[in-house]
């Protein structure tokens, strides 16, 4: 029942200055409203739609950027991992390690991540029912790690389209673990632009608000000062200068929701 | 921006006493919180899963019940219609005529309903995209009737399952007409019990709250004093004695949402 | 185990001459290969995407056209019906009455159709699981009519898209009734052109062949001598001059399939 | 236009004797009908539904089994890979390396596999549209490897269900690469048994025949002498003693399809 956690940052880490700029701005926006904040940034986009899509800074450079954000801004940091042998190194810097949706059933990755003792945020696969997440949870718990977050990021709905099922949030909450709404990727249109994914940025606040009103623990939102020129996920990122108002709005719904919990 | 409208009542009309009991209770619950209220009841379930399902009182008897509710309780009443030649008669009693989802593209029914001048509530078909509703709206508008409501009641999602896409609410709102969330039928499991439809009653308040937080005009909820013994839709109706708390909760989210409108 | 039945004709009836031209051509094409033939034509498109779409000749004129086809060509004729009170009149002319997919659960229509004693072809709704069709069948059988055909025409798959599940054919065949593949409408893109439905004509032969290879009773294909200028369903109709080759190809797969029945 | 390739074997490799027994039997069945044959077996099930599911022999032991099959039976062998650093070692033994569906967009795995020069069989993700496969193909082609197979194994269709869209086969064939139908996994019910996946074995021959009738290059079928006691995928594997009749039936449809190619 703590106030809403906002997990936010650019899709890709671009540089120390860029990351600190976004993290600093988001930390202020969150502090101003009482929201908790974790900075998110990827060092490697390992499953771009096409080969021409930018991959990112790489692990070594990316971890330096994340370390600098922790020191300069003082916030926890999150990144996503794609290979078991990256987990130990990444956990030296990152507070939260995220399992990408496509990889949410890869046993070795879940175990390697769990064994670091870091908080593990698993994105539910686009192909997975919410009631199948306890099997994923059990893989991580088998390492003795019970610091787990579960994220809804949309389910496949025909071709090139996702739909976010609001029932999935209370269903996953039955595991006892905190539930996160990924408002950015649930409005993605996978592959919808031929060589890259499209998105419906205008609906990200819709998803965020609907989910927060249900009393979830956290919302995940990607943001950029210039989304249309960002190296990835531009079509569904929210402009940084609108994040303050969005967080302020969400925290009001969060307070109301947590004062009046749904019993499902 | 008026306060939330609650469209509520039993799935089927059962008797004058039963309808007045539910309408009276709901009218009190709504008045207590400032919500608007319209009583809903069906006189004919024209598309039951199986032949053995109860059809209802029939038009003549049903309209008498609805008339008695209007007089005794003083609230507007809504019923669903299935044939063009019923529209004129039904409109003599009903304030709102509802087009069932399966029938939302039947041109003759839309025209006959529109021509009565009554408010027309169209349920979006389980097979229809929200951006295709303007074609439905134009059919009704062609009669000169611009008193239209548009309802989300779930989209087909594989077999025996529906999913409610929250993006559908602001998408339909772009028509300029008030949008309704049917919290009861969007958690239906069509045909999910073999000879009848199943449902997930526990998720109806989830759907209602998520949708109301987006600033919609109305919520549609079926209720019964004993859902498990109701003649239809029992698995997804909400017990009448919980409706007061639910409406009270929803009206708080409604106030917050309407003070902070989403711009989509 | 009789040879494949081909149900074919234009989407809309246009005139006596036009209907006889298509029926004559199709009857020859079918006779040349040993296929059975039923002529199909609609007198009313009662659920066009938008109001501007042409509705058709109307019942009186349409039945005259169908009667003329029966007499001139000597083939059975099929049309679709949308209202219970049309059934008796239509059955005076038509050998097969078709229940549209959107209406496949409308009890009164199923009963009125069944009571005529005509063959009833029910299209499975885009929202219905194949294992729910026995409930539909039971409604018709309750009239004493056991002359029933069951048609697959695609299931909703996200927005503006259908998918034809091949499992649906043997699943529906478990009822004991003949199963039909509608190769035209299963490649429809409902509402996919804004004010009308799109389609993928090039995939209709794919659907037809895959289904026929499973040993089904019949295939339903709409055809027109100039699909791009047809009053409806142009994007998914097959040009008339290609039907001969298509039927010839299908009848070869039909023979192989019926000599080697699948046991499901 | 060569005769149908049958990719078949148990889900998991169990032992040298077991693999040789199945490969020998399948090689005979295929030779008897003129079908081509590749033996399939997995050494590691890296994404089991739950942690309790058996993982398999491991890479070292598994490759010994596959090597023994090549030598004893004289057929090519296929296995699936899950990590880039396994590719070079696996390619020393395997003729075909398979990219699992969940991993079909993992760039590093596609590149590492491609660089071995082995034939790469990519399973289209349950979350991917068939027209997005050219992006996957381009990743492999960037290594200079143009020995690629593309496999349909079903698309997500609501929860715990897949649907195989027959249009996907000619759509993927537009890449110019051979197309494979995975008749086993397209009838899987992912997670459908709680801690493991269910399946509908009875529909695998339905999928295989429908797809083969379209003129595809290959069919993928898992088989076991005792499916109900197999360590994985039991619910959708076909009993080994039925494979001879199935291959014989498929090869007849294959011959007819390749003599009468569909033009899509």
Image (cartoon, coloured by chain):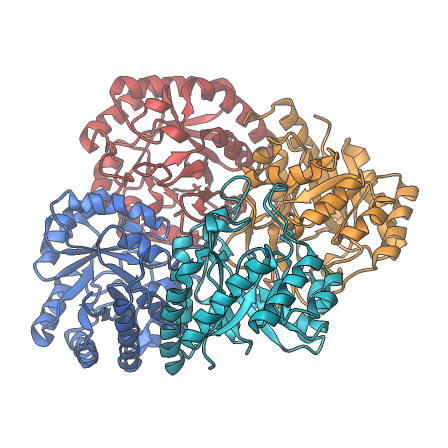
Chain colours: A orange, B red, C blue, D cyan
Instruction: Tell me the quadrant of the picture where the C terminus of chain D can be found.
Output: bottom left
Figure check: C27 above or below D130: below
Which quadrant holds residue B38? top left
Q: Percent x, y for residue D263?
A: 42, 79
Left or right: residue B17 versus residue D59 is left
* Of B130 and C51, the residue lying toward us: B130
Residue occupying the point 38% across, 70% down: D248
Which quadrant holds residue C29? bottom left
Left or right: residue C118 versus residue D144 is left
Q: Percent x, y for residue D17?
A: 57, 59
Residue B164 in sight from this viewpoint:
yes
* Of D239 and A171, the residue lying toward us: D239
Figure check: D189 above or below D2: above
* Of C78 and D212, the residue lying toward us: D212
Residue occupying the point 23% across, 60% down: C44
Which quadrant holds residue A37? top right
Q: Percent x, y for residue B6?
A: 44, 29
Q: Percent x, y for residue D9?
A: 52, 62
* Of C133 and D95, the residue lying toward us: D95
Figure check: A108 above or below C161: above
């Amino acid at each position: 029942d703590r106030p809403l956690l906002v997990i936010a940052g650019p899709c890709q880490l671009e540089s120390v200055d860029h990351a600190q700029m976004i993290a600093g701005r988001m930390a202020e926006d969150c502090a101003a409203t009482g929201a908790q904040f974790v900075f998110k940034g990827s060092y490697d986009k390992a499953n771009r739609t096409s080969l021409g899509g930018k991959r990112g800074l790489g692990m070594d450079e990316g971890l330096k950027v994340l370390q600098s954000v922790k020191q300069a801004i003082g916030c926890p940091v999150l990144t996503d991992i794609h290979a078991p042998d990256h987990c130990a190194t990444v956990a030296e810097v990152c507070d939260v390690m995220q399992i990408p949706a496509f990889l949410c059933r890869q046993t070795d990755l879940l175990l390697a991540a769990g064994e670091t003792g870091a908080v593990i945020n698993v994105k539910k696969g686009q192909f997975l029912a919410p009631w199948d997440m306890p099997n994923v949870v059990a893989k991580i718990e088998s390492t003795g790690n019970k610091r787990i977050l579960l994220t809804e990021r949309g389910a496949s709905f025909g071709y090139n389209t996702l739909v976010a099922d609001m029932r999935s949030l209370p269903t996953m909450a039955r595991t006892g673990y905190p539930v996160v709404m990924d408002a950015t990727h649930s409005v993605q249109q996978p592959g919808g632009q031929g060589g890259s994914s499209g998105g419906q940025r205008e609906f990200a606040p819709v998803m965020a608000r609907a989910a927060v009103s249900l009393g979830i623990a956290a919302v995940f939102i990607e943001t950029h000062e210039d989304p249309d020129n960002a190296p990835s996920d531009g079509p569904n990122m929210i402009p940084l200068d609108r994040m303050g108002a969005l967080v302020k709005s969400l925290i009001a719904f969060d307070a109301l929701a947590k004062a009046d919990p749904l019993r499902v």
